[in-house]
Image: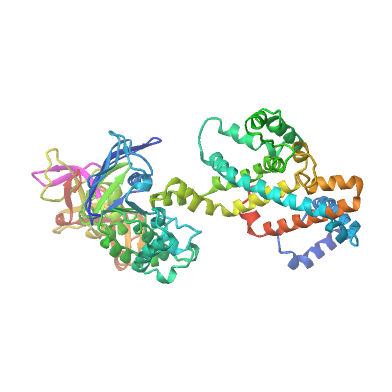
Amino acid sequence: MTTARGPVAAEERRQRRAPHERRTGGVVPLPLAVLATLAVLFLLVPLGAMLLRAPWTSLPRILEEGSVLEALRLSLLCASAATAVSLLVGVPLAWVLARAEFRGLPLLRALVTLPLVLPPVVGGVALLLAFGRLGVVGRYLDLWFGFTLPFTTLGVIAAEAFVAMPFLVVTVEGAFRSLDRGYEEAAVTLGASRLTTFRRVTLPLVGPSLVAGSVLCWARALGEFGATITFAGNFPGRTQTMPLAVYLAMETDPDAALALSLVLLLVSVAVLALLRDRWLRAGSTL
Amino acid sequence: MTAGLAVDGRVDRGGFSLDVQARVAPREVLGVLGPNGAGKSTLLRALAGLVPLTEGSIRLGDTVLDEAATDTWVPAEQRPVGIVFQDYRLFPHLDVRDNVAFAPRSRGAGRAESRRAAQHWVDRLDLADLATRRPWQLSGGQAQRVALARALAADPALLLLDEPLAALDARTRLDVRSTLRQHLADFAGPVVVVTHDPLEAMVLADRLLVLEGGRVVQQGTPASVARHPATDYVARLVGLNLYAGRLDSLSGEVTLDGGGRLVATLTPEANPADGRVLVALSPAAISVHVTPLDHTSMRNVWRGRVSGLELLGDRVRLQVQAEPAAIVDITAAALTDLGLERGSDVWLAAKATETVAYPETGG
């Protein structure tokens, strides 16, 4: 900002610059610009610090260690499985929330999306109380089927699905809600049953939101920490996912923690690249 | 495929009530004409099975599609009813061929088999070149043909069209109208076309049913409806002056409800016991004069004042405040010759032979 040298000079300057300032949008008021810059720095400096301090030379050695690859493999597997589970039951749930009409629907909607705002650790505790060996449901799973969920890989998947599914449900529900019902009506008049209509018309039409919701869900599951460590523990090869491995490594081997973090960062960037185009904009209501 | 449609029922929906009795024979095209909110779309939705009747029944030949009394209800997906929606509703995620193949596929045919079935209609409606296009790559006229092909591929026994030309621009409307007429003529079952455009109704339909406020106000051939409109709405649509009044059967003079009298020619059936008649008078059959007519053979001469002028193509439509008030069409040349403008005093004249009276119950 140049200092004004009186109103006349300011007026002259405005006139001179006028042809270049024809755009009326995009002019950012100074206070907003300063605060926005602070926000950008706050978000980017830590990432930059990670890249600056990364042990680039010892990186290959750390990553080649079996435990790292194992944690990565487990993370990808569990996040994908949690996403699959969320798709299988979350999409029908989203449809019910968007389309069904019954008393208590608003309450149900609030309850099933509660994990969005619930601290994940609390989610883990809740899961233990339900599916733990002595839990409300888990007791009978153990008694009748000899099946235990906590502290197993399945437990990791359950914890991740619990925390991440609402992201999918909320995204897809919005898409179902805003979908033009005319297409479904047309399908029905062409002889398609309700289920065929759902499969051949409704689902394809919300496809972009389905993808966006799945990616959000998957990314959330991949980064899940609190519920996982509470409900599934921290057993390498079985329940130790990347975030747990990073946390553990910070105490013993900070370089390894940094290396693991870089891998997760890489995965996140890949997810962003996937979402970048139309998907995030076209479908998501988040 | 050769069963006629019989509707006799009522649909109540949130304060609005639609009450319709109609028969449509196989190969007959019924045009349902009416202003917005008259219940045209509700009628189509009831026929298609998208809303249930509150009372009465819908039959297709011997098949009962909907009957409130016996609680009979054939759901939309099981009705042999094809519908072309006003906005076409082509599936955006499918190309033209798969849109047309949707109905066979929904009935359980395999992909190859349903595409073969679709191919017949793709060829029939001249869509072969467009088969792999997506709906957004089609012009309005093309999309309309795809929508028709998609509906026909379901092999329906009853075909419904909702404002089939409304989404098209004026130029394509002309082309599409004539091809649509041909395709409808090829269809063996009854056809119901809903429209608010009288021209569309006249061209496409064999018979008209006029709906107003959820009630049938007139039924008849396009020609009879155009000649003898039963309500102001229809009269305005077909561009006629319409007056209600009481006929003096001795003098042949009609005393109009809105003031004024007209000497009219009676249609053969126009001699109702109560004397109530409608009088229709074409705007082109009225002549305009700026001086009194002393010696004239015209039986109807009355005085008025021009209250509005409107250019309609090569002619000028005058609104004349008088008893009775009238719209009058004159040529642009006549307008200049007579030196007419808003507020001019005029004498109107019409022959009794052009002034047609018929019973109020509709022609």
Query: Position of B299 compared to A71: left or right?
Result: left
Q: Position of residue B202 (x, y in %)?
A: 27, 58
Q: Position of residue A91 (x, y in %)?
A: 57, 45
| The quadrant where residue B187 appears | bottom left
- Decide which of B131, A16 is in the foreground and name it: B131
Residue A84 visible, this angle: yes
Q: Position of residue B78 (x, y in %)?
A: 35, 47
Residue A40 visible, this angle: no
Query: Position of B166 compared to A281: left or right?
Result: left
Does residue B82 lie above or below A90 as drawn?
below
In this rendering, the count of numbered labels is 0
Query: Position of B75 compared to B229: left or right?
Result: right
Q: Position of residue A127 (x, y in %)?
A: 70, 34
- Decide which of B32, B273 is in the foreground and name it: B32
Identify the residue at the far left of this view.
B250
- Decide which of B266, B185 is in the foreground and name it: B185
**Quarter of the image where the N terminus of chain A is located:** bottom right
Does residue A193 lie above or below B170 as drawn?
above
Q: What secondary structure predominates along the stretch shown in magenta?
A: strand
Query: Position of A141 compared to A152: left or right?
Result: left
Which color scheme did the rendering employ for the protein?
A: rainbow
- The part of the chain drawn in magenta is B242-257
Q: Is residue B247 magenta?
A: yes
Q: Is residue A5 magenta?
A: no
Q: Residue at x 35, y 39 (%)?
A: B52
